[in-house]
Amino acid sequence: MINMAIVDDDSDFLEELKEISEKYFISHFVEHKLSTFSKGCNLIYELQEGKKFHIYLLDIELSDGEINGLKLAEFIQAQKNANSYVIFITNHLEFALNGYELDIFRYILKEQAAEKLPQALEEIGKRMNIQSGEFYTIDKAGFREKLFYSDILYIYKEQKNAVFVTGNGTSTIRNSLSRVMTELNNDGFVYINKGVIINISRIQKINGLEIILDNGEQLYASRTHIQDVKMLVSKFWRKYI
């Protein structure tokens, strides 16, 4: 499920952005949920309550007091909202100069939204699918849960279970790590020791045996695995970045 937040104080254009995005996701058979906001402060309230989005479409020039698109992007980054993409929608690209310190995925002129937004969503989809073969499915007790590969931080062994750790919590399946690794079938995952599989794309830094993830969490590789980890991490980033 892709969660997208769209912020624009022009109600007509807000609806247009929603329709463009909806059309793209439906045509590509992508499960999605679109949340629209006419005020930046309303998005901030959602984020403060713990809501997370994969994609943010932000109007830079919001008539919302001191909260414009730049301030929203700063707030999103301060929340350490890992693996999210911010797209600025604007009438004036000169505003982009004020956002050079922010990690903005793309700037799109409003008049070009119908053409450029689907292209941006296509590129985001490709990047997200690098870490995914889309998703891992957990079936148990009468319900099905889909875990996007891009959301998975790491997976560890707990007795006869495999526990998936994501940015939203944990999910458990009665399965061996070796079988999970086979089912993932993706070069974006690697064993760091016998009991832990890590998502390479979520690694921020390796310091000795210490592995620091993009959410600040620290894990440790075994001495027998660390060289393989470094080699596979290097190979992965050369391939995809």
Image: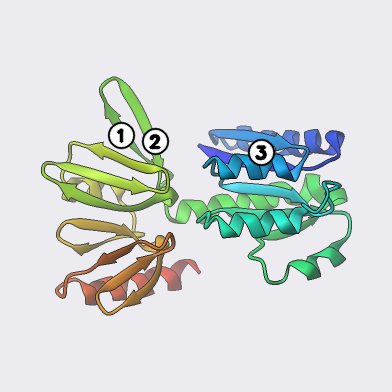
Circle 2 Cα neighbour tier, 10 Å, few/some/many (<14 / 14–19 / ≥20): few
Q: Which residue is mark 3?
A: 24
Label 1: few (<14), some or many (≥20) within 10 Å?
Answer: some
Q: CA distance from mark 1 to mark 2?
A: 6 Å
The image quadrant that residue 148 belongs to is top left
How would you rate the neighbour count of disc 3 (Cα within 10 Å): few for under 14, some for 14-19, many for 20 or more? some
Q: Outermost residue, left direction? A: 159
Q: Amino acid at mark 2?
A: Lys
Where residue 66 appears, as percent x and y from the top left, is 80, 54
Q: Check residue 138 in the rendering and tell me which mark sits there, or answer none.
A: 1
At 16% from the left and 56% from the top, the residue drawn is 195
Give the residue at mark 2.
146
> Mark 3 against mark 2, which lies toward the viewer?
2
Q: Residue at x 57, y 44 (%)?
A: 48
Could you say whether the residue bearing mark 3 is in a helix, strand or loop?
A: helix
Q: Are marks 1 and 2 in contact (CB under 8 Å)?
A: yes
Helix, strand, or loop for circle 1? Answer: strand
Depicted 72 relative to depicted 20: above or below: below
Q: Is residue 127 left or right of residue 93?
A: left
Tag 2 or tag 1, which sits nearer the N-term? 1
